[in-house]
Image (cartoon, grey):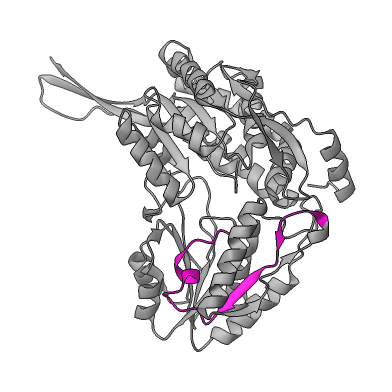
Amino acid sequence: MDITHEEWLLRAKSLDLSGAHHIDGTDEDGSGAAFDAVSPRDGRVLARIADAGTAEVDAAVAAARRAFDTGPWPRLAPAERGAALLRVADLLQERRADLALTVSLEMGKPVTDAYEIELRALIDTFRWYGQLADKVTDESPHTAADALALVTREPAGVVGAVVPWNFPLTLAGWKVAPALAAGCTVVLKPSENSPLSALLLGRIAAEAGLPPGVLNVVGGTGPVAGRAIGLHPEVDVLAFTGSTEVGRHFLRYAADSNLKRVWLELGGKSPNIILPDAPDLEKAAATAAWGIFFNQGEMCTAPSRLLVHTSIAEQVIESVVRRARELRIGDPLDPSTEMGALVGEAHLGRVRDRIATGLAEGARLRTGGARTLTETGGSYLEPTVFDRVDPGMRLAREEIFGPVLSVLTFDDLDEAVRLANDTEYGLAAGLWTSDLSTAHRVSRALRAGTVWVNCYEEGDLTVPFGGMKQSGNGRDKSAHALEKYTELKTTWIQL
């Protein structure tokens, strides 16, 4: 990307930000109810967002139902569906700068990260599932000589996808692309904090040739629009990424409606273990700092609990603190910015409350903790590091979802594993060691869906992503994601 700060600012002034729903292939204002999309960059209103109620959700689900029951999409040859997803990927690439700018404006991340990381992930996801669509085969098990058994994988139906604001396009892509590849139709509800990029995604998909009703996007709040999708009897599958608390609601909605399948990718309080034999302590510390401060710490996989052996603790902490103080916090539209704004004032207030609680509990604040850049009108917070954190403190137990690192120490490997697993969550973990046996043994012992060894947040679309325990169920990414959006049917033919 070779776009200057001034060029991004000019683009922002001319960017067309539509808050209309995208239902059955067209933009709809719905009932007329609306709310403001406010940029955390400077507190300014970006657009008015059509606020979906039950009527708009009903219309979107009805469109998806028609497209599934009588439309061409589920009946296309898989290669044709794949080709359509590849056309979407191509058009997303053409509109990459506008999409990245929209993400940056609505949720505060540096536009460089939005362009280089978020949009790359979205485009790669549509391209990968487009290429995979015709590679999934049915089965014909060997059975008795006088019978033929067939096991077919069929699209599950209408998918409701509810996604959060921290990676509004990446996480939407992880749900939408495999569901479409499988032959399902989708109703996507983005967070009310970041609806604009998802609404633009819906329009781009239509421009790329997706039939009407195949991908519908509705703006609205979780308690109204999200609840309506969760309770809707014509939604066959619900895929959600967000908090554990809201995940519980979706399970209840399924129980109270049609027992739809509910796939949940929820919160995390991920441990990052650094052993004395780490191959490069400076790299381990730098990665620990990057992991917690990237995306303003607003990541479910963020390594928010740094577990360090007592013999190297001060060396590692000093390195992390130094890097925190060197981070460039600033305008998300400035390519030199390394950490942007938190998603909004309400969330900033919650994170600051957690910092105050940590101080009251007796943890030591090593750096940060204060609001900054107040003159901008935006929601900015200093990168924050606590040490002397006790495992029972809320700092060590509750997901903060901000740039706040808690450092705990241990004396031996068994204690490190015990501390790492001492959480209700099980989304991700990190481990730094030079010993191959330790890497294997500890990785197996950690109760987490993903374990990174001598790295963090690495991977590609070939590997699945998801959690254990109260971090959820099911997997995004990889061919395994298709399992969420398909049904297995057994056909037994007596010859």
Point 63% across, 26% down: residue: 33
The vertical placement of 301 against 39, above or below, is below
Residue 283: name its quadrant: bottom right
Counting from the top left corner in percent of width and height, residue 306 is at: 51, 73
* In magenta stretch: residue 396: yes
Query: In the image shown, does 280 or 226 lie closer to the viewer?
Result: 226
Magenta region: 376-402
Query: In the image shown, does 468 or 79 lie closer to the viewer?
Result: 468
Q: Is residue 402 visible?
A: no
Image quadrant in which the C terminus is located = top left
The vertical placement of 478 against 487, above or below, is below
On the rendered structure, is 469 left or right of 357? left
Counting from the top left corner in percent of width and height, residue 126 is at: 57, 34
Query: In the image shown, does 391 or 51 lie closer to the viewer?
Result: 51
Counting from the top left corner in percent of width and height, residue 54 is at: 49, 25
Point 50% across, 70% down: residue: 395
Residue 331: name its quadrant: bottom right
Point 51% across, 31% down: residue: 225
Looking at the image, which residue sits at the far top? 70
The vertical placement of 64 against 374, above or below, is above
Counting from the top left corner in percent of width and height, residue 452 is at: 48, 63
Query: In the image shown, does 354 or 297 lie closer to the viewer?
Result: 354
* In magenta stretch: residue 247: no
Point 36% across, 35% down: residue: 253
The vertical placement of 98 against 338, above or below, is above
Q: Is residue 126 visible?
A: yes
On the rendered structure, is 253 left or right of 26? left
Looking at the image, which residue sits at the far bottom? 311
